[in-house]
Amino acid sequence: MLWKAQTTRIKCLTRGIVAPLAVISLAMAVAPVALKAGGSSSSPLPLPPAASDAWRRIQSIWPELAELAAEAPAWAIVGAVAPGWEEDWQRAQNLHDRLATSLAAGAASTQPPGESLADAVYQLEAEIPVLYTRLLPSRSVEIRILPVDAGSFTQFALAGNIDLLVRMAKSAGFNAIFLETLRDDGYLVYPSTWGEEAPELAATRRDAFAELIEEAHNESIAVFPWIKLLFATANGELGPVISKHPDWAAVQQNGKIQTVPYNFVWFNPAHPEVRDFLTSQIKDLAERYEIDGIQLDYVRYPNNYGTDLDYSYDPVTIEQFKQLYGFDPKQLPPIPAERRASSTFRPDDLPEEYQSWNAFRQEIITSLLTRVVREARAVRPGLPVSVAPFVATWGGGTYQQALLWHQNWPVWLERRLPNLLSPLTYTDRAAVLDRELSRVEELAHGRAIIAPSLSVSAANDSEWGSLGLLQQIRVVQRHGAAGYRVFAFPHLRADNWYSLRTGPFRRPALNPVLQPAEAVATLLEEFTTLLQEIERARGEMSQAAAEMDETDGETDKTGGEPASGVAKLPPANRWTAQFRSRLAALPQGAREPASYRDWLALERAVASMLATASDHTVAAAESVARQILLETMAIAQAELWRLRPAGLGYQEN
């Protein structure tokens, strides 16, 4: 069977992970490195106010840059860092150190602020984004998703520039496009008997979606239709479908279709005709287009948008619920908006009747998703499915916030519906992304590849442009998550495109969703290469320690005078010989310590510094190896779960 052959290959590849684990057990035992908070002195700086602010910003990011620079040699071994980064980092580090020394000395003086110092601060501040871009690794395996909204796609299609859109994605390093298939006015961007194509696109008599797929595949870019499953319109009107079938809409407690304050109209997921319609629409897509997967968004009930509104209290939903539970949910009092918005709110704390109402709606959503996915995979077996669950970027429990909108997505994973998670981790703070990604990973438990959604508009920094986005990409990399959804096309500025192309997306990457076995093999090869480098560095450290022991022995035997010069040292004593050769090359007056004992003490100190540097090199290489191993295991676990026979887990009907 196909699944058995694929499973065997993945197992053979992942078996190579187990043996080397002991080599980096210490690194694996340590949690992902915490985001460092920048420190700044409260003492007045000898700088103008603007330059003082710039220096404090530099200090806040500097520990992160130093950490990237420490890991860069290890990433360079596997080709993930651009050549020439050493010179850039050394130049910036020298400037930073000179500034730090000058500012520390100047802070205690009474001299007026120095303009030359301020200019140097501004120079270093301007170099920070470029330096961060060059130091950030470009991984060989990850899904890089460019979501393209239906409005932008319409403009490209009408201008006949679908090829330009694909070239833009390719040049920036993206390897997947998620195309939004439904516009805010409720019209589709492709021809279909299950929904209405936008009139201006229909008038061209061209299938722009088919053109996109062809152009993208020519550039090895995957295409997923981005389907807002229960979304009808976002322009305050009912749209072409709901206007014909108003009973298909989700309604509030008073039975009315709510269009304010955000102008959204939603489908009612409990209505049998809606379920038929949405399932047929997606099945039609899978039958007629060479898609590489589907992205299912808005797989939930509507938001309340800061109001006491709740959904859906239509006759169909109420009747279904009453048959199961014996009471009318309209009798339940509304939950105040301020309570829902509280970070301490838990749906499980509600009265039992309300929990029954919530559980019913969760199963409505889950059963609809189950049907849609199975119908699509009946047409295209093994079709990758991505979902975008809610998280708690503003606080509260990650799982609880998803349940608030009736998204019991861990159950979706248990039923093997999605194999890619793109949680809505939209935030302007890397620490929040770090927290929510950790919680999603814990809930997912290795049952799907995770590619969190990064908000370009929220992450863009007012001072450093794309730096905020790059910092969030780094968070994802350190977690070992296998990609990103960079949201979204219309929000990307010129500096974003440039930073991605010259930074984390500078080299092509295998798509682990479509090529999981190849991805695991590639990562294992990189992991093995790094292990060899770690062992080599450890060998040098052991040799240095042995040489220093020999030096100590010489000192003990000769009363402080070395028993052997450079010429008499054994060939293995490379470090000691190198030091003595360099010392001998110095001018006579510069190399005459008070005694040989001082000379040997100096030799010992230098060797100790070299050993410490090697120790740091090993630690950095272990950190990089750990990140590669985490990504390897994440991909392998998700694929093995996807290929698991039905009899070993969730029973498929």
Image (spheres, helix red, strand yellow):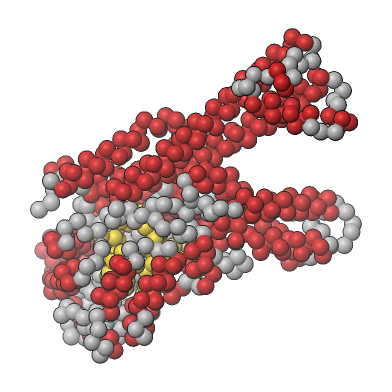
Quarter-of-image position of residue 398: bottom left
249 or 495, nearer to the observer: 495
Where is residue 446 shown, x and y percent of the image? Answer: 31, 46
Number of on-image labels: 0
Query: Horizontal placement of 134 versus 189: left or right?
Result: right
52 or 484, nearer to the observer: 484
List the single residue furthest toward the front: 567
Q: Is residue 487 visible?
A: no
Give the residue at x 42% y 43%.
Answer: 526
Give the residue at x 13% y 66%.
Answer: 320
Query: Horizontal placement of 517 versus 106: left or right?
Result: left
Where is residue 9 shown, x and y percent of the image? Answer: 24, 42
Give the residue at x 43% y 75%.
Answer: 490
Query: Horizontal placement of 526 versus 135: left or right?
Result: left
Query: Horizontal placement of 384 versus 562: left or right?
Result: left
Q: Is residue 101 visible?
A: yes
Where is residue 180 shown, x and y percent of the image? Answer: 31, 73
Where is residue 427 shown, x and y percent of the image? Answer: 47, 62
Q: Name above or below for residue 166 compared with residue 622.
A: below
Give the residue at x 44% y 39%.
Answer: 529
Q: Name above or below for residue 171 compared with residue 540.
A: below
